Amino acid sequence: MKYYMLIYYVVDDYVERRTAFREEHLRLANGASKRKELLLGGAFSDPSDRSVLVFHVKDIAAVEDFVKHDPYVINGLVKRWEIRPWNVVVGSAQQ
């Protein structure tokens, strides 16, 4: 199992526009969390320009599948995204 950070770079009016898609996005995220794929997720504030989701999965395909089905991405709230492998070295999640 590997850790990956999914970083969303969101549009300027993200906070206003996300309301219409939030329930569906959270359903997707909660499903991934129940499967123990998604460990943490949240948005930065001040400014609200990015979000980060931390996955612990067998391979990157699970994270790519999440992105493919995320209503925030599908509906243009995310202007770009990246998936980065993440090496945990301190804390209870270390390998």
Image: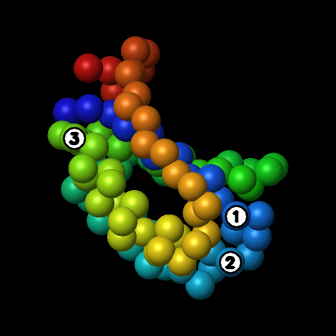
Write down the residue under mark 2.
Answer: 17
Say if mark 2 contacts mark 1, CB within 8 Å: yes
x 20%, y 33%: residue: 1
The image quarter in which residue 13 lies: bottom right
Mark 3, secondary structure of its residue: loop
Mark 1, secondary structure of its residue: loop
Q: Amino acid at mark 3?
A: Asp
Write down the residue under mark 3.
Answer: 59
Q: Return the residue found at the far bottom.
A: 20
The answer to whether one can see residue 22 in this image is no
Q: Mark 1 and mark 3: span between their CA atoms?
A: 28 Å
- Where residue 60 appears, x then y in whole percent? 27, 43
Left or right for 8, reference 94: right
Give the class, few, some or many, for how many residues have Cα within 10 Å of label 2's Cα (few <14, many ≥20): some
- Where residue 37 appears, x then y in whole percent? 27, 49
* Nearer the camera: disc 2 or disc 1: 1
Number of marks in picture? 3
Q: Earlier in the sequence, mark 2 or mark 1?
A: 1
Q: Earlier in the sequence, mark 2 or mark 3?
A: 2
Write down the residue under mark 1.
Answer: 11
